[in-house]
Amino acid sequence: MAYILLFPKLLAGPIVKYHEIADQLRIRPKSLEDVREGATRFCYGMGKKVLVADLSGDIANAVFALPIAQLSFGEAWLGALAFSAQIYFDFSAYSDMAIGIARVLGFRLRENFNYPYTAQNITEFWRRWHISLSSWIRECIYIPLGGSRVGTARTYVNLTVAFLLSGFWHGAAWTYVVWGIFHGLFLVVVTEINHSR
């Protein structure tokens, strides 16, 4: 029950599995250093949310509200970049705040984002973006479907299904479903290219 109600990990991540914090639920040394570092991390996350994510969202919303006929090439790119910043800084800010609150309470949660927009390819991007969700999808969906041990065609189906469900996790709208399928198919293409080399 304590694990289920542990509020720092409930909403936006990081996703924490019971076995990762079972020992911490029983024994977790607390110190003023933990409180200081946790509070600092929380404030850092709050700053990312309020100063970067929300302002980027305002820009993206303003651009996306323009009629398509009035939208210039530069404005379209500005909207796309602002939305990309909003998504990343929203998610990573919530993770920072959750990790910070948990640290104040004596819990050590794992990192959830590792500069994903600096990734060299889509595979690396998904190793750096919402790390706890990616590992949960791998462990609870992709591997039970057979992972990459069931032949090439089935591996590609497994990747696509895993990312389709990831799209559903992000939101219950067709845009998220398409987003999930797009990323799954993109990973299939990259995997196929790497296999053919």
Image: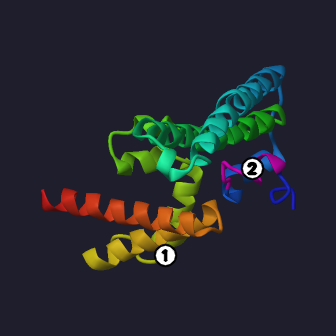
Report x, y in % for residue 55.
67, 32
- The quadrant in which residue 156 appears is bottom left
| Residue 151 seen anywhere in this rendered image of the structure | no
Extreme residue in the left direction:
197
Q: Amino acid at mark 1?
A: Pro
Rendered residue at 65%/30% (across/down): 52
| Residue 118 seen anywhere in this rendered image of the structure | yes
Report x, y in % for residue 131.
54, 48
Report x, y in % for residue 70.
50, 45
Dot 1: element: loop
Dot 2: element: helix
Rendered residue at 59%/44% (across/down): 87
- What residue would you read off at disc 1? 144
Q: Sequence order check: which comes first, mark 1 or mark 2? A: 2
CA separation in Å, label 1 and label 2: 24 Å
Cβ atoms at labels 1 and 2 below 8 Å apart: no
Q: What residue span does the magenta drawing correspond to?
A: 7-16
Q: Is 97 displayed left or right of 193 in the figure?
A: right
Q: Is 96 displayed left or right of 3 in the figure?
A: left
